[in-house]
């Protein structure tokens, strides 16, 4: 609440969270606010498997062949034309990213990872994921079942809160808490 001219005014802040599919984070121009143009290319995201956060991007700088890292902390905005940063100093040498050394070395990727329940039931493979464009946290995983199972069933959306464990080969999620029958009525009839 805020007091304005002797009156208490109550307001609610609205925070817009926009999820973007993973394709919006691959092969994007890096745009400089200072020069007003592209200064490099963000090739693919650096995903931390410990917290499912995009820590940055493997990148290249214009006119330089050496690999660079674009830390997500340097990103001012993500727009349709690319990833906006202040200037070329946002592109960092990989050896300067000491805190992310282990994450950079494994080059973790989500697409194609198998998803199992905690009871070892195969759910499917990760086909895509969505990322919060402000916090850079991966919020949802989209799994597709194998061709034989996929004929009768739909794709599965997995919330990050369902994830129990992530390894190099698989993702383990909690069992669904309730099963919904397609034949059950949506509401109970009035008495």
Image (tube, rainbow, N blue to C red):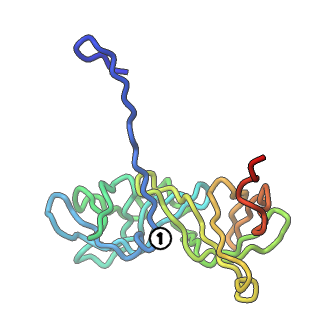
In terms of depth relative to the viewer, which is nearer, 131 or 91? 131
Q: Which residue is mark 1?
A: 22
Residue under the image location 65 percent in, 75 percent down: 155
Tell whether 184 sits left or right of 158.
right
Residue under the image location 39 percent in, 65 percent down: 69
Q: Residue 182 location, x and y as percent?
A: 75, 69
Residue 51 vertical placement versus 10 (above, below): below
Determine which quarter of the picture holds residue 39. bottom left
User: As drawn, which residue projects farthest toward the front?
Assistant: 191
Task: Give the crowd class for mark 1: few <14, some 14-19, many >=20 residues within 10 Å.
Answer: some
Q: Secondary structure at mark 1?
A: helix
Residue under the image location 53 percent in, 60 percent down: 138
Residue under the image location 27 percent in, 58 percent down: 85
In terms of depth relative to the viewer, which is nearer, 7 or 70? 7
Residue 97 vertical placement versus 170 (above, below): above
Q: Residue 99 location, x and y as percent?
A: 50, 53
Residue 12 vertical placement versus 3 (above, below): below
Image quadrant occupied by the N terminus: top left
Q: Residue 87 location, x and y as percent?
A: 22, 59
User: As drawn, which residue projects farthest toward the left?
Assistant: 35
Determine which quarter of the picture holds residue 31. bottom left
User: As drawn, which residue projects farthest toward the bottom?
Assistant: 148
Q: Residue 61 location, x and y as percent?
A: 28, 72
- Total count of labels: 1
User: As drawn, which residue projects farthest toward the top?
Assistant: 6
In terms of depth relative to the viewer, which is nearer, 44 or 179? 179
Residue 189 vertical placement versus 110 (above, below): above
Determine which quarter of the picture holds residue 150. bottom right
């Amino acid at each position: 609440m805020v007091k304005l001219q002797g009156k208490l005014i109550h307001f609610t802040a609205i925070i817009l969270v926009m999820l973007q599919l993973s394709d919006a984070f691959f092969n994007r121009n890096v745009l400089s606010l200072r020069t007003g143009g592209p200064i490099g290319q963000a090739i693919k995201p650096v995903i931390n498997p410990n917290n499912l956060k995009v820590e940055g991007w493997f990148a290249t700088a214009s006119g330089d062949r050496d690999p660079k890292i674009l830390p997500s902390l340097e990103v001012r905005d993500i727009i349709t034309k690319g990833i906006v940063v202040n200037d070329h100093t946002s592109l960092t040498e990989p050896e300067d990213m000491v805190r992310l050394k282990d994450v950079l070395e494994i080059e973790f990727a989500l697409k194609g990872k198998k998803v199992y329940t905690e009871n070892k039931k195969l759910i499917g493979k990760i086909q895509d994921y969505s990322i919060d464009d402000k916090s850079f946290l991966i919020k949802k995983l989209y799994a597709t079942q194998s061709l034989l199972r996929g004929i009768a069933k739909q794709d599965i959306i997995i919330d990050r809160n369902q994830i129990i464990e992530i390894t190099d080969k698989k993702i383990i999620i909690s069992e669904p808490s309730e099963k919904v029958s397609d034949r059950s009525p949506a509401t109970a009839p009035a008495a």
